[in-house]
Amino acid sequence: MRLLTATAAALRTALRTPRLVLLLWGAHLAIAAVAFYPALRFLDRTLANAPAGDEFLRRFSLPLFGDVMRSGRAWFEGFGQLLTLVVVLTLLWNVLSAGGALESLLSGDPSRLAHRFGRGAGRFFGRFLRMGLAAVPAALLVAGVLAGPIFGVRASLADNAEGAKFWLGLVGLLVALFAILLVQLALDLARIRVARDDVRKGVRVFRATLRAVLRRPWQVLAIWLPLAAAFVAIAALYLGFRSLLPAGGGLLLVLFLAQQLVMIARAGMRVALWSGEIALVEKKWATAPLHGRLAAAPQVAVRSAA
């Protein structure tokens, strides 16, 4: 019951901050458009008069995509640079959006969202970037410690044990992804502590928070799991809806709008996750010393951010 109550409270926070949700969604859409709009223009020029091109409106076709790549090899070589730019912009935006969103949710400032978001994005960018860079080797280390023995056992098996190797490889991959998830959740909690208490030494806070998460991972997983399950259900509904639609150019806009609703839901789940993590930080590290400003209660901050 307590878990359901906490999840419902986190979702209510997302519903009370629609402008923050739409800001996160709109920024990701704009970054994705940097690469995917030129790609769509290229596919339109290449497949506009090809009957097989209608298949792309429903599902990805590897043979057709291979033919398109062979015919437009020069264009795809340049497209790789666009994808690199999108990855860099996404990583930078994730750092900026974390600072902006946490400032919006924690500050209790009645000013406009744009002011609070911009202030937090600039104020915490350097600290959050250093914490993110510190999280990369930490994730590799934790993944190696947890999944390394599994891959070691897999490597020691005989060549004819193909079935066992397959399942051990799959389990090892899942364990490695679980380890990376724990590090990411610990990074979230550490950034909340830094934003709440205005701590300068963010990397030290991250390492201490990661140790706490690794000792008791179920505390933060109890926040993440229900929200992840809800998003998986929303994505499954979208995939089911898409499979019911016949192929045709006239339905492309409908599919795009439905997909963007899923992306808005994803942004809402992100805000809800931050809200649940803020509540956990207030409970677990409520007596942390403050450095610079008083931490506002999440409930009050959320009302001001709405």
Image (cartoon, rainbow, N blue to C red):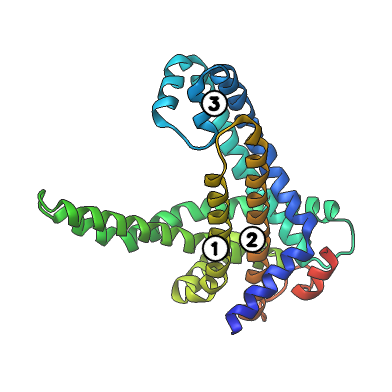
Is residue 239 or residue 78 the one in the foreground? 239
Q: Confirm or deny contact between disc 3 and disc 2 (CB under 8 A).
A: no
- Residue on which disc 1 sits: 228
Please report the residue visible at 63 percent of the width from the left and 43 percent of the height from the top: 92
Please report the residue visible at 25 percent of the width from the left and 60 percent of the height from the top: 150
Q: Secondary structure at mark 2?
A: helix
Q: Confirm or deny contact between disc 2 and disc 1 (CB under 8 A).
A: yes
Is residue 227 or residue 153 the one in the foreground? 227
Is tag 3's residue or tag 2's residue first in the polypeptide sequence? Answer: 3
Q: Secondary structure at mark 3?
A: helix
Is residue 116 or residue 273 the one in the foreground? 273
Q: Is residue 77 left or right of residue 30?
A: left
Up the image or down, 94 lies above or below 51; here it is below
- Residue on which disc 3 sits: 81
Q: Is residue 58 left or right of residue 26?
A: left
Up the image or down, 1 lies above or below 61; here it is below
Kind of residue indicated by mark 3: Gln
